[in-house]
Amino acid sequence: MDRFDAMLAFARVVEAGSFTKAADTLRLSRATVTQLVQQLEARLRVKLLHRTTRRVQVTADGAAYYERVVRLLADMDDAETSLSVASASPRGRLRVDVPSPLARLILVPALPGFHARYPEIQVDMGVSDRMVDLLGENVDCVVRGGELADTSLVARRVGDLPIGVYASPGYLALAGVPAHPRELEDTYHRIVGFLRSRTGKVLPTVMHRDAEQLEVHGRHAFAVDDGNAYLAAGVAGLGVLWLPHYMAEAHVARGELVPLFDGWHIDPMPLSIAYPPNRHVSTKLRVFIDWVVEVMARSSLTRINSA
């Protein structure tokens, strides 16, 4: 038995809650992962996992051992990457998840520069606006806009996304141009709803002008939980949108969207990178985080948070 492989297999089973999912992340067969964990338990003479037909649960001894294993695996990773060749060129697989518009418009176009700098890092990018189980899905980090719902995660604020209100010329020709945000509550106006992944609800937006503050709910005939589809719905004339400037800029330039409510403001959307508190920040993850900060700093449509 290779002790490193066995400890890695055990850690992935704990994180995924499943031998099958752990095997997928390790690119091994389920039988191989099961055998490695069984050999580890036999060597330690301790039961690390409770197994049932539906789930895998870590024992008290297994939980204590897992914490030690995670630190040991992290130390081994550091030992490798501290070598001069490795530290100059971090390597390995990095699993990240980012919102679809941010991936399409900003991060993916900039990735050739990242790979030129770090050719030995393999980036596996999930593109979604959903809640991601970082441990269960063995994801190293997520990039998210808005306040993070999971306060147990370690988060680094990388910037703020200015927000505006927009509608298509076709929509405005039919519904009229609203002069005040309160008009969006009228029966002849519609918004495009954005469904929050945690609640499945469309949340109101708070708008400011001088001392005036207004919470806008609006009515929607269509709601969606994906940023690219949300933008497409607005361009198609399905309603009024609240968009980060980076998503709206090209469509405004082409005349596909029109900015609304001059003088009104929406608090910018915080943009953060988050990862589990027990997940070691490896060199490859650290350079990826620094690269995202660098890319966002170069974007003229993002305000960088100095904290």
Image: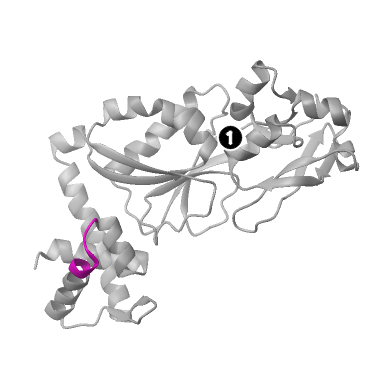
Q: Is residue 301 left or right of residue 209?
A: left
Q: Residues within 10 Å of mark 1 (few under 14, many from 20)?
A: many
Tag 1, which secondary structure? strand
Q: What residue is shown with label 1?
A: 160
Q: Quadrant of the N terminus?
A: bottom left
Where, by quadrant of the figure, is residue 230 drawn? top right
Residue located farthest toward the left when viewing the structure as drawn: 1
Q: In this rendering, is residue 228 above or below 255?
A: below
The residue lying at 77 percent from left, 40 percent from top is 191
Where residue 68 sits: x, y (%)?
25, 67
Where, by quadrant of the figure, is residue 185 drawn? top right
How many discs appear? 1
Q: Is residue 220 left or right of residue 99?
A: right
Way the structure is coloured: one colour
Looking at the picture, tell me which residue is in the foreground, 232 or 136: 232
Looking at the picture, tell me which residue is in the foreground, 221 or 91: 221
Where, by quadrant of the figure, is residue 229 drawn? top right
The residue lying at 26 percent from left, 31 percent from top is 118
Q: In this rendering, is residue 31 above or below 74?
A: below
Where residue 178 sits: x, y (%)?
87, 30
Please check the rendered image and state whether residue 32 is part of the magenta-colored stretch, yes or no.
yes
Where residue 53 sits: x, y (%)?
36, 80
The magenta span reads: 27-33
Q: In this rendering, is residue 89 above or below 95?
A: above
The residue lying at 36 percent from left, 64 percent from top is 16
| Residue type (three-letter) at the residue carrying disc 1 | Asp
Where residue 136 sits: x, y (%)?
40, 62
Does any portion of residue 268 appear in the rendered image? no
Does any portion of residue 8 appear in the rendered image? yes
The residue lying at 20 percent from left, 50 percent from top is 77
Q: Is residue 78 left or right of residue 224?
A: left
